[in-house]
Each structure stands twice: as C-alpha cells, then as structure tokens.
Image (cartoon, rainbow, N blue to C red):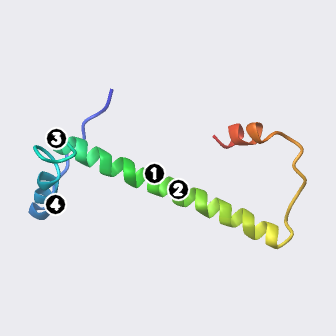
C-alpha cells in the first residue's frame, strides 16, 4: 500500500502535468505521471551510483590496487544487495 504526498506546484508545472496525463496521453492520471517521473529519476540516480562504483574499481585496477578473488560471483552480488 502506498502513502499520500501532497505537493504544491507552480502554475507552469501544473500545466505540464496536466498536458502529460489524462485522455490522449500515456498516463490516466496526474499521479501516474508523477510516479513514473519519480521512478525514472530513482533509476537514473541508481545507475549513476553503479557507474561511479565501476569507475572507482577500474581506477583501482589501473593503479594496481587489486586482490585475488576466491569466491563466487553470486555470493559477491548477494553481499552487494
């Protein structure tokens, strides 16, 4: 079950939401539109964190900061969750 969050929008933002929700759009309601925008932003931020971690690891390899891995990839991935 979700929770409710009330937002105050500028007239310009409200018009944007209204143009992108309702009849003739991908979203039946303004709530669906805003939820999808929030999901997309969350995924974007998570992807950026993953890219940053990959770059940090790559830089470590370039600088010789490595160690032998003696486990399974699955156990490593499970620990990361």
Query: Image height check: is 2 above or below 61?
Result: above
Disc ID at residue 43: 1
Of labels 4 and 1, earlier in sequence is 4
| Distance (Cα) linking label 3 and label 4 | 15 Å
Q: Real-space Cα distance between discs 2 and 3? A: 27 Å
Q: Secondary structure at mark 1?
A: helix
For residue 21, the mark is none
Q: CA distance from mark 4 to mark 2?
A: 26 Å
Q: Which residue is mark 2?
A: 47
Label 4 sits on residue: 13
Image quarter (top left, top right, bottom left or bottom right) of the C terminus: top right
From the viewer's perspective, tell me whether residue 68 is left or right of residue 47.
right
Q: Answer whether labels 2 and 3 touch (C-beta < 8 Å).
A: no
- Residue 79, position as x, y percentages in the image: 71, 39
Sequence-wise first label, 4 or 2 = 4
- Left or right: 26 as drawn, with respect to 18: right
Quadrant housing residue 13: bottom left
Cα–Cα span, label 1 and label 2: 6 Å
Residue in the picture at 73% in, 62% down: 57
Residue at 10% in and 58% down: 15
For the point 56% across and 58% down, which residue is it? 49
In the displayed structure, does residue 24 sit left or right of residue 67?
A: left
Residue in the foreground of this view, choosing between 4 and 24: 24
In 3D space, how far apart are the residues under numbered discs 4 and 1 (Cα atoms)? Answer: 22 Å
Q: Is residue 53 left or right of residue 5?
A: right
Residues packed near mark 3 inside 10 Å, few (<14), some (14 to 19) or many (20 plus) = some
């Amino acid at each position: 079950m979700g929770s409710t969050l009330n937002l105050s929008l500028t007239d310009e933002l409200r018009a944007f939401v209204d143009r992108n929700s309702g009849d003739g759009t991908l979203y039946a309601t303004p709530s669906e539109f805003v939820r999808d925008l929030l999901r997309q932003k969350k995924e974007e931020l998570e992807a950026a964190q993953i890219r940053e971690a990959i770059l940090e690891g790559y830089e470590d390899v370039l600088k010789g900061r490595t160690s032998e891995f003696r486990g399974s990839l699955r156990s490593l991935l499970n620990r990361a969750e």
